[in-house]
Amino acid sequence: MEKKNLDWANLSFSYVKTDYRYVANYTAAAGKWDEGGLTTDDQIVMSEDAGVLQYSQSVFEGLKAYTTKDGHIVTFRPDLNAQRMYDSAKRLEIPPVPVDQFVDAVHQVVKANEAWVPPYGTGATLYLRPYVFGISPVIGVKPADDYQFRVFCTPVGPYFKGGAKPIYVRITDYDRAAPHGTGNIKAGLNYAMSLEAIVEAHQAGFAENIYLDAATRTKIEETGGANILFVAQDDTLVVPKSNSILPSITRRSLVYVAEHYLGMKVDERPVYLKEVLDGEFKECGLCGTAAVISPIGKINDHGKDYEFASGMEEMGPWMSKLRSTLLGIQEGEIEAPEGWIHVIG
Ligand code: PLP
Ligand code: COI
């Protein structure tokens, strides 16, 4: 199979239309998801009154396919994305896509778009975007009757410009998620309401916003598109725990890597902004599928800067070890825990 002629090493995190995508449909009349299949048609025709257009009834996922050192194409823990989309769907009264159907759809899309999977060693990956949305008309506030599940893919480079270079972020005054809201699911509505905050942050020179807990505004939650990790002065990996943040698969994997591969102590607990500003942590980073691990060099809290000991020039030693171990597992250079790597071809 001949690869597409792309400048793989210089891809940004943006959409490129690829050859095949997967589509399945659910109708209330049938009461189940149909078998689904691949198509080359990237366009969607729907009612002007579709549930997704009126009341934002949609949830999505993000995961990647990698080329390993020995030339296989693999995905990383797609069953966890499938389960999370199942949970997200239930929260928005969307009929959940069965976990096996999700994993199979991802598999089919990667296989059909093999020519778009970036080669090993380029730093690029194939980003997969599964999503499900209400497609039939609703006018009173209620769930739609019919739904569509799609998976497309696009080759991507680093989410933040400069790849692994430390970023400068700010504490925002916007809230992301209410205590009993939707912060723990991956719904488009959580991102729609973050757009004003991210545009303003970028205009002010920051790469991202750190959201605090909405109830007390004292605890660190996450950023608009990633969870946050800290390394304490005694080398413990400290991971913010909250019911209103997204249960990141990268974060859960890194906790395992820290404990079982790097011998780190891990502490999952609420983390107070005051601890950060008081210098309790020497390293900090964002983690997620898109972000991988992006080190945070400096945080701005209402005009006052706090710089981590690792600084703005380089990633700190622990973040660097976590990143290279996780990437090594994903790219087949380091043995993975049972069940983490799904070989596609
Ligand atoms: N938090 C938010 C708000 C996200 O959008 C993402 C991205 O998926 C993450 C965290 C990281 O989750 P994961 O590691 O499963 O990609
Ligand atoms: C991801 O990491 O997959 C995300 O969804 C983050 C962002 C692109 C929304």
Image (spheres, helix red, strand yellow):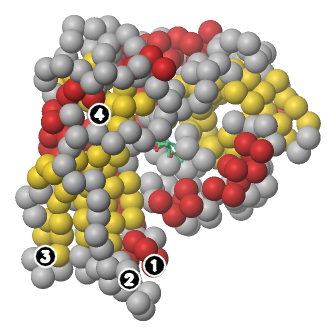
Q: Which residue is mark 3?
A: 31
Task: Count numbered badges in the picture.
Answer: 4
Residue 63 visible from this viewpoint: no
**How much space separates mark 3 and mark 2, taking CA atoms?**
21 Å
Mark earlier in primary sequence (4, 2): 2
> In which quadrant of the rendered view does residue 47 lie?
bottom left
User: Which residue is drawn at the image coordinates 45% and 59% (left, top)?
Assistant: 187
Q: Is residue 217 above or below residue 252?
A: below
Secondary structure, mark 3, is loop
Which residue type carries mark 1? Gln
Secondary structure, mark 4, is loop
Which residue type carries mark 2? Asp
Mark earlier in primary sequence (1, 3): 3
> In which quadrant of the rendered view does residue 133 lie?
bottom left
Q: Quadrant of the C terminus?
A: top left
Q: Which residue is mark 4?
A: 77
Mark earlier in primary sequence (4, 1): 1
Which residue type carries mark 4? Arg
Q: Which residue is mark 2?
A: 49
